[in-house]
Image: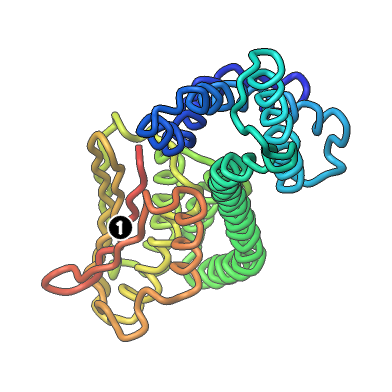
Amino acid sequence: MLRPGGSATKAIPYLLAFSLVGVSGPIVVTLVYNDYLLVASNVAFAVCTPFFLLAAGYLVWAAFGTRLSTPWSLVLALVIGCLAAQAFNLYLTEVVMGMGVHPGKGYLYRLSGVRGPLLWFGLAAAAWYAVRRSEESAAELTRAELASDQLRASTAEAQLQALQAQVEPHFLFNTLAHVKWLYRRDPERGRRMLDRFIDYLQAALPHVRQGSATLEQELQLAQAYLDLQQLRIGERLEFTIEVPPDIASHKFPPLMLLTLVENAIKHGIAPQLEGGAIGIRATADDRLLRIEVRDTGAGLRQAAGSGMGLANVRARLAALFGAGARLVIEPNFPHGVVAAIEIPR
């Protein structure tokens, strides 16, 4: 505000009011003793002081600019402004108007009346600076938190890509080895599995490295994966997908749904001799999109929900949506697990 080119006009009414409040005590005392000359002097000083302070502020900023820190600029402007206002007030009342406000007193004594204004304007400047620093610190903290969120998002995506680099070759080689084994034992079943494997690759490769996808794309990928697993496991696996068409085009983070499906196969269905069923279901309201993967497998265990895949999902949700999204892991009665992702619409 006090820098050259700044606008100080908005502050003048507040400075005038503050200055008049500051001299209200001396004005009341002098009124009690009917010393109207001193009352006039105090009022004149209160009125002119804000203008001298603003002028001193402009001069300090013009002379020193950013070479002088803000606290020292304020101190210098306050001292110069208050002294100049007191000197001008003495000249106006005693020389121009001929008012003997301080008869018999030296000029330095009369100038010492600047102590009061220095005190109250100094306290006001200190309070303003403390509030300003607090606001700047809050803004810096907000920027730091935003940068931290962006870093977490980048880290989560990097972890996802690293996880993909580790998992994809393992999954591909295992599937190809199984196809090779089936072609030797059951060529027809081997051809069906190879067809499903091609469907999976066609669904996965176009967007496996992208940062965003739609729920429909993720469902296609999950269905291709389940078709492939159904051929590998056989009748031990059943699955259903229930998603309303009106929410299928909603944006959804890539590979999160597939992670839940893989987790249900690995930890729920595969350990059971009798297998089980997996159901994918999506619902939405005005605030949230919820997609859940239900299995009738082995159920929650002591370490359930703490694996690398689910930890990665939680980290990505926090980085992408903050507190607005979450991963829910809960029992599926009478047995099995429900894993659900909730994201804002």
Residue 205 left/right relative to 287: right
Total count of labels? 1
Look at the picture and state if 110 lies above or below 311.
Answer: above
Look at the picture and state if 328 lies above or below 111.
Answer: below
The residue depicted at 67 percent of the width and 35 percent of the height is 82
- SS label for mark 1: strand
Query: Which residue lies under the disc numbered 1?
Result: 340
Residue lying farthest front?
A: 104
- Which one is nearer the viewer's eye here, 8 or 80? 80
| Residue 342, position as x, y percentages in the image | 32, 51
| Residue 206, position as x, y percentages in the image | 60, 41
Residue 233 left/right relative to 313: left
Residue 326 placement: quadrant: bottom left
| Residue 127, position as x, y percentages in the image | 54, 47
- Which one is nearer the viewer's eye here, 64 or 186? 64
Q: Quadrant of the C terminus?
A: top left
Q: Residues within 10 Å of mark 1 (few under 14, many from 20)?
A: many
Residue 90 left/right relative to 15: right
Residue lying farthest bottom?
A: 302
Query: What residue type is disc 1 on?
Result: Ala
Q: Quadrant of the N terminus?
A: top right
- Which one is nearer the viewer's eye here, 31 or 254? 31
